């Protein structure tokens, strides 16, 4: 089997099963483990999968650029956001990370709900700046343009001074073993600090985010309190994913 054929077979198996193991592929294809490791390293560098110990897992097909994501999966985002809003009570302090699903949460906050909201997201600030009942605080820093958020030392310093009731964490990859990951190292570090500071943590993840992973770790699924997903994925997560203390919405 030619190298190109072998690598296409690997990608086909990832697409079907979300994960492949070197030992299994070695038996199926009749090639050495070292050959397959080299294939996985090459495919990882091309951004086509994520190499992990013993094999590889899928990467999400979600575009990196915020502007490319804003008009995708609109109905799923509305469905998930509607499940999150009832968790909040008047007077709560929220930390809202960037992301298009989180932006939909911001859009659905009722006009009569009084909250304090910290965010590093430009689109969320623009959406909420005229909300009549909010105390809205923008966390300034270095602009990370692809996600339309701020990062850097000033963001870290501000996060260390707050202890929000809720974190709505923006995440593009959720995997039952790898947990929550991100493609950018600095953004992943910032998200980890958000998780540490919050008392309760929420993620919103549709089908495109499930069973995928990137290079940089953000948190374990055990760090999450509420996991909002599409209606047709609720039972799948409850039954097929490892048991953690989070509530699936």
Image (tube, rainbow, N blue to C red):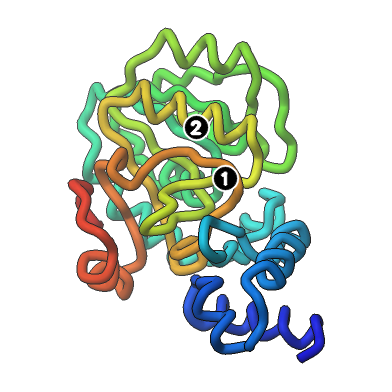
Q: In which quarter of the image is the N terminus?
A: bottom right
**Image marks 1 and 2: residues in contact by CB distance under 8 Å:** yes
Q: Earlier in the sequence, mark 1 or mark 2?
A: 1
Q: Residue at label 2?
A: 191
Is residue 19 shown above or below 195? Answer: below
Query: Residue at the location (29% across, 32% down)?
Result: 113
Closer-to-camera residue (131/200): 200
Residue 96 at x, y = what percent? 45, 33
Q: Residue at label 1?
A: 182
Left or right: residue 17 compared with residue 111: right
Residue 172 at x, y = what percent? 53, 52
Query: Residue at the location (51% across, 72% down)?
Result: 21
Query: Residue at the location (55% across, 20% down)?
Result: 138
Closer-to-camera residue (120/233): 233
> Quadrant location of residue 140?
top right
Query: Residue at the location (28% across, 43% down)?
Result: 222
> Dot 1: what SS?
strand
Is residue 207 shown above or below 225? Answer: below
Left or right: residue 214 compared with residue 17: right
- Residue at mark 1 to residue at mark 2: CA–CA distance: 9 Å
> Quadrant location of residue 106?
top left
> Dot 2: what SS?
helix
For disc 2, the neighbor class at 10 Å (few under 14, some 14 to 19, many from 20) is: many
Is residue 232 shown above or below 109? Answer: below
Left or right: residue 217 compared with residue 148: left
Closer-to-camera residue (7/104): 7
Residue 92 at x, y = what percent? 26, 25
Q: In which quarter of the image is the C terminus?
A: bottom left
Residue 245 at x, y = what percent? 18, 46
């Amino acid at each position: 089997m030619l190298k190109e054929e072998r690598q296409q077979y690997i990608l086909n198996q990832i697409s079907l099963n979300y994960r492949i193991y070197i030992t299994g592929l070695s038996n199926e294809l009749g090639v050495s483990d070292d050959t397959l490791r080299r294939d996985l390293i090459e495919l990882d560098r091309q951004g086509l999968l994520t190499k992990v110990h013993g094999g590889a897992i899928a990467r999400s097909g979600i575009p990196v650029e915020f502007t490319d994501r804003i008009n995708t999966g609109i109905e799923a985002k509305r469905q998930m956001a509607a499940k999150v809003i009832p968790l909040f009570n008047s007077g709560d302090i929220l930390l809202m990370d960037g992301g298009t699903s989180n932006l939909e949460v911001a859009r659905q906050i009722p006009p009569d709900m009084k909250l304090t909201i910290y965010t590093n997201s430009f689109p969320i600030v623009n959406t909420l700046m005229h909300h009549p009942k909010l105390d809205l605080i923008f966390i300034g820093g270095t602009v990370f343009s692809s996600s339309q958020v701020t990062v850097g030392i000033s963001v870290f310093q501000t996060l260390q001074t707050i202890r929000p009731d809720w974190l709505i964490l923006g995440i593009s990859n959720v995997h039952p073993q790898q947990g929550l990951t991100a493609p950018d190292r600095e953004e992943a570090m910032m998200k980890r600090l958000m998780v540490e500071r919050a008392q309760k943590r929420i993620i919103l993840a549709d089908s495109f985010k499930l069973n995928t992973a990137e290079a940089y770790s953000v948190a374990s699924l055990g760090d999450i309190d509420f996991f909002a997903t599409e209606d047709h994925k609720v039972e799948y997560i409850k039954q097929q994913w490892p048991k953690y203390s989070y509530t699936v919405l």
